[in-house]
């Protein structure tokens, strides 16, 4: 089959491709995965550009999704998983211990900045719960809100990049 035959018989090609795809779903999945991996950076860059150019639309969509029934369900499930991880920890830090840690801290553990109205205290898990960290006193530190948000679920964080 040549290129010209392909051009003249697009409907036959499409039918043959659909038939093959239906018969080989695992191969299709693998091919699509390889294609995504090969083009991943292009996809991510395209998404970054779109988000930067359409910030208002993206924020409006995120807000409406968070208010939707599905968005609330997803958020609720994430909170339940987080609470379950904390409860499963043996010798978990008590509320009194956490409160003492929060009140004793005078500076952010990452940027060493003083806490004030704009840099409020925030409890941080040095090794995040999502990465297998425990809710124990040894794994807790006090950070300012901006540093804690930027650290997210990373294992290591350096404030010099802020």
Image (cartoon, rainbow, N blue to C red):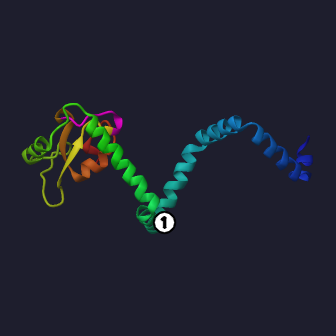
User: Residue 86: x and y, percent?
Assistant: 27, 39
Left or right of 161 on screen, residue 26: right
* Viewer-proximal residue among 140 and 97: 97
When asked about the image quadrant of residue 28, the answer is: top right
Q: Is 130 on the left-hand or right-hand side of 135?
A: right
The structure residue drawn at horizontal position 29% and vertical position 50%, both measured from the top left corner, is: 149
Where is residue 76 drawn, in percent x and y? 37, 53
Q: Position of residue 78 (x, y in %)?
A: 37, 48
Which secondary structure class fits the magenta region best?
loop
Q: Residue at x 68, y 37 (%)?
A: 31
Q: Which residues are magenta?
A: 130-136
Which percent across, then down, holds residue 88?
A: 28, 35
Residue 133 within the magenta-colored segment of the rendering: yes
The image quadrant of residue 37 is top right
Q: Which residue is mark 1?
A: 54
Seen at 20% across and 38% down, the residue is: 140
Comparing 125 with 22, the one in front is 22
Quadrant where the N terminus sits is top right
Out of 130 and 71, give the one closest to the viewer.
71
155 in magenta: no
């Amino acid at each position: 089959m040549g290129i010209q035959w392909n051009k003249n018989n697009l409907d036959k090609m499409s039918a043959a491709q659909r038939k093959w795809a239906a018969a080989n779903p695992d191969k299709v999945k693998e091919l699509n995965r390889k294609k995504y991996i090969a083009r991943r950076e292009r996809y991510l860059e395209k998404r970054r550009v779109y988000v930067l150019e359409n910030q208002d639309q993206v924020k409006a969509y995120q807000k409406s999704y968070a208010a939707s029934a599905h968005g609330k369900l997803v958020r609720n499930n994430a909170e339940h998983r987080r609470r379950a991880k904390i409860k499963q920890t043996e010798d978990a830090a008590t509320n009194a211990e956490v409160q003492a840690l929060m009140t004793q801290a005078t500076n952010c553990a990452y940027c060493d900045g003083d806490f004030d109205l704009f840099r409020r205290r925030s409890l941080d898990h040095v090794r995040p719960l999502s990465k297998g960290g425990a809710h124990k006193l040894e794994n807790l530190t006090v950070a300012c809100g901006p540093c804690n948000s930027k650290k997210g679920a990373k294992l290591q964080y350096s404030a010099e990049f802020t």
